[in-house]
Amino acid sequence: MEGLAAHAAVIAGLPLATLNEFLKSFRRIASKDVLAAIGMSERTAQRAFARDLEPGGQSATTVDSSVSNRILQLNKIRQLATTVLGGQDAAEEWLLQPAMALDQSRPIDLLKSTEGINMATDLLTRMEYGVYS
């Protein structure tokens, strides 16, 4: 999803089912770490999923626009890392490992801000082109 379609999806809020599928798509990163990266607590996610399953209850069918935006950003970073590093497992391992170029911060921990997302993207781009300084 890109461009105006991505913008519209973020503004409307991604469906809760999309969040669930997104969490399940990670093979090496625990859901709690993904949730932290997208700015949602485990408890909030548990309540939303439980409420969505209740018959006749208040259905929490979407996540807010801030979380929706972070889901798209994390997915873009994971896709770029998968391309640069040659596979999803390597990309997820990279997201979890402290990086010298990021002052020993884990890339996944930087994805909570636009600046952190830019730093992770820049590092991946430099890695892709063999520029490490």
Image: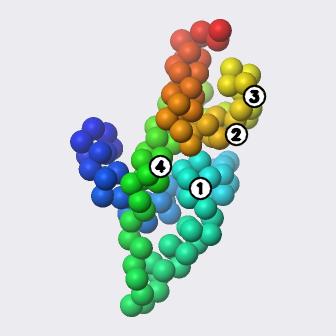
Q: Amino acid at mark 4?
A: Ile
Q: Is residue 57 visible in this depiction of the protein? A: yes
Decide which of tag 2 and tag 4 comes sooner along the chain.
4
Q: Which residue is mark 2?
A: 96
Quick one: label 4, few (<14), some, or many (20+) residues within 10 Å?
A: many
Q: Secondary structure at mark 1?
A: helix
Disc 4 secondary structure class: helix
Q: Is residue 40 above or below residue 71?
A: below
Q: Could you say which disc has been placed on residue 35 in the image?
A: 1
First of labels 3, 1 by sequence position: 1
Residue 21 as seen in the image, left or right of residue 90: left
The residue sitting at 47% across, 54% down in the picture is 67
Whether 45 is drawn above or below 93: the answer is below
Residue marked by disc 3: 104
Residue 35 on image: x %, y %: 59, 55
| Dot 3 or dot 4, earlier in sequence | 4
> Mark 4 = which residue?
71
Amino acid type, label 2: Leu
